[in-house]
Image (spheres, grey):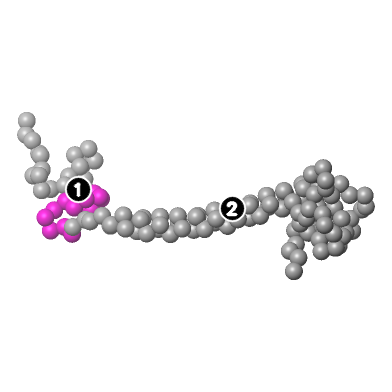
């Protein structure tokens, strides 16, 4: 039996009976260029930092919108649960007070014209949502 084993420095695939040095993903000779892996750690860290800042900014924006929406919901709940004997007109300003029994009531009388326990001033918009407004 004669062995036709190639020397170690020759890249030969015995199964396919082919020289396949060019197909290898690694250097196969001393004269081949050095294969280095790119440093992706700094790129990843930089981009992770940027993405985290963007996500944090979006979260804070959404939280602000949510808090504003919840505040609007609470005001609407308060005004709609108050007692009033008239049909509010869209675009008009109304004042919310607390009565003697701590029950809120809606009135057209301004806070400087009466001595009721003042809660806030609201305006009914076209969507039937009460918006709190500040008196100047």
Residue 126 image position (x, y, % from top left): 83, 59
Residue 116 at least partly seen: yes
Residue 129 image position (x, y, % from top left): 79, 54
Q: Residues within 10 Å of mark 2 (few under 14, many from 20)?
A: few
For the residues labelled 1 and 2, the Cα–Cα distance comes to 63 Å
Q: Nearer the viewer, residue 89 or 99?
A: 99
Task: Answer left or right for 77 relative to 25.
Answer: right
Instruction: Please say whether residue 94 is one of the residues in the magenta stretch.
Output: no
Instruction: Please say whether residue 30 is one of the residues in the magenta stretch.
Output: yes
Task: Answer left or right for 119 relative to 24.
Answer: right
Give me the residue at 75% from left, 62% from top: 133
Q: How many marks?
A: 2
Is tag 1's residue or tag 2's residue first in the polypeptide sequence? 1
Give me the residue at 21% from left, 56% from top: 35
Q: Quadrant of residue 122?
A: bottom right
Q: Nearer the viewer, residue 35 or 42?
A: 42
Q: Nearer the viewer, residue 43 or 80?
A: 80
Question: Looking at the rendered structure, which numbered label has been put on residue 38?
Answer: none
Q: Nearer the viewer, residue 49 or 100?
A: 100
According to the picture, the residue beneath numbered tag 1 turns out to be 19
Q: Quadrant of residue 48?
A: bottom left
According to the picture, the residue beneath numbered tag 2 turns out to be 63
Q: Residues within 10 Å of mark 1 (few under 14, many from 20)?
A: few
Q: Residue furthest bottom?
A: 136
Magenta stretch in the rendered image: 22-33
Give me the residue at 13% from left, 53% from top: 29
Q: Residue furthest front?
A: 115
């Amino acid at each position: 039996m004669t062995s036709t084993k190639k020397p170690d420095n020759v890249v030969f695939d015995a199964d396919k009976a082919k020289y396949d040095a060019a197909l290898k993903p690694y250097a196969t000779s001393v004269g081949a260029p050095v294969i280095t892996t790119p440093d992706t750690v700094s790129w990843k860290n930089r981009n992770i930092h940027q993405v985290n800042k963007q996500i944090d900014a979006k979260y804070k924006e959404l939280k602000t919108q949510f808090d504003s929406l919840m505040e609007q919901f609470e005001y609407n709940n308060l005004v709609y649960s108050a007692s009033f004997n008239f049909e509010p007109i869209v675009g008009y300003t109304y004042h919310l007070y607390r009565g003697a029994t701590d029950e809120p009531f809606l009135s057209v009388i301004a806070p400087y014209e009466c001595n009721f326990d003042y809660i806030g001033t609201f305006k009914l918009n076209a969507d039937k949502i009460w918006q709190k407004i500040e008196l100047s």
